[in-house]
Amino acid sequence: MTIISIATAVFLFVAVENLRQGARTSFERTISDTDLIVGARSGSINLVLYSIFQIGNPTSNVTWETYEDITKRPDIAWTVPISLGDSHRGYRVIGTTDAYFDHYKYGDSRSPGFRDGRVFIDLFDIVLGAQVADRLDYELGTSITLSHGLGATSFSEHTDKPFEVVGILAPTGTPLDRSVFVSLEAIEAIHVGWNSGTQTAFSRMATPERVRNMNLQPKSITAILVGARSRIQTLRIQRDLNTYKKEPLQAVIPGVALSRLWGIVSVVEQALAAVSAFVIAVGMIGILTSILTGLNERRREMAILRSVGARGRHIVALLVSEAALLAFTGAISGIVCLYGMTLALSPWLEERFNIGAARHLPGLFDLWVVLGVTCAAALLGLIPAIIALRRSLSDGLSIRF
């Protein structure tokens, strides 16, 4: 039972540490291979939150003319526009182009793949994230409508312009799973004739057939994903965009902003580390309790050993090595169980939560855990050893009734 308790403590400690490190790495790899995110001037963390994590709202938009100016820069390889502001049953709608699925990367430079269907082609085609399709039980060919605004419940529905589901993304473990994708032209089409979030008479007359013949080029967008031709040029591009004279812009490097954001929520990380440390401490107390409890029943054994010539150091070595062996066996058992489960569950963890950075094989950290637990148990074993030495031979050899 002592070995099982130690194995459980080490299992939880290392598992929490691996998940903590894996979650942090995966969090920072929610977006990769994107050099800059450009939006209206606000705060770097706010820009990343609403453009990547779909949390919060933008302070303003970026004009289409500015987007075209940025795209024409010779030091920029590609740009992807993003338009936000609508939703479907609480899930945010992202208006963009088909280039989004080519240039947006996550994890180890992975592109979002399709579980079913294809990218949007027609004006009223729509692509769903895996979580949206699963939770709302949608499939290809389903007809859905979008809502004005970002709330789970909206009183401004675009019911006159339904969309058809033509694609469902494969799970990524990122905010993409909770997203709905349409073209930029579709965002403009559903808002033809709308004024300050209110549908006008002209909007009711703008049928799907009529809007197809209209000029649907957007006047503004929410944010821009930017890829530089060379990483060396990133800082210069960032400086130029942050001092852009036509309108106030802010360009942030995603990795830097994500590191700052994780620093804000690091209190949770520290709490997990503290909990896992207490788990190990409880396991150590379990070893001490087990040996002290058994020591009372082993008085005669200790007395007989001393009567046949065992010295004090032999008794100490016996109890200390017993505690160390129990801890070592439990720690190794916990490590083996953990990585066995990790190998079995890693595909599911990566698909559902994008925790692909969790280690699949033991490393130096695990070795230090085993050594630390074993040494701590050996030190705790000195307590019952000293108690055994202080007891006299007659205490163990006399018959007690």
Image (cartoon, rainbow, N blue to C red):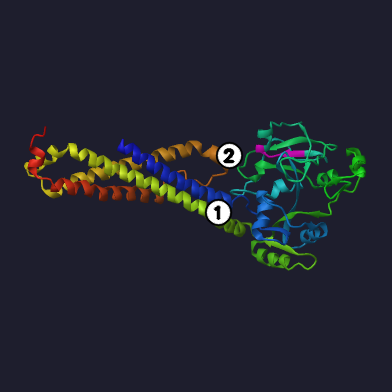
Q: Earlier in the sequence, mark 2 or mark 1?
A: 1
Q: Which residues are magenta?
A: 126-131
Rendering coords of residue 373 (x, y %): 33, 48
Residue 67 or 13: which is nearer the viewer?
13
Please report the residue visible at 55 percent of the width from the left and 57 percent of the height from the top. 263
Residue 22 or 2: which is nearer the viewer?
2
Rendering coords of residue 163 (x, y %): 80, 37
The image quarter in which residue 324 lies: top left
Mark 2 packing: few (<14 Cα in 10 Å), some, or many (20+)?
Answer: some
Residue 297 visible in the displayed image:
yes
Magenta span has 127? Answer: yes
Residue 361 visible in the displayed image:
no
Residue 84 or 98: which is nearer the viewer?
84
188 to the left or right of 222: right
From this view, report whether residue 348 is shown above or below residue 236.
above
Magenta span has 312? Answer: no
Please report the residue visible at 71 percent of the width from the left and 52 percent of the height from the top. 57
Q: Which residue is mark 2?
A: 352
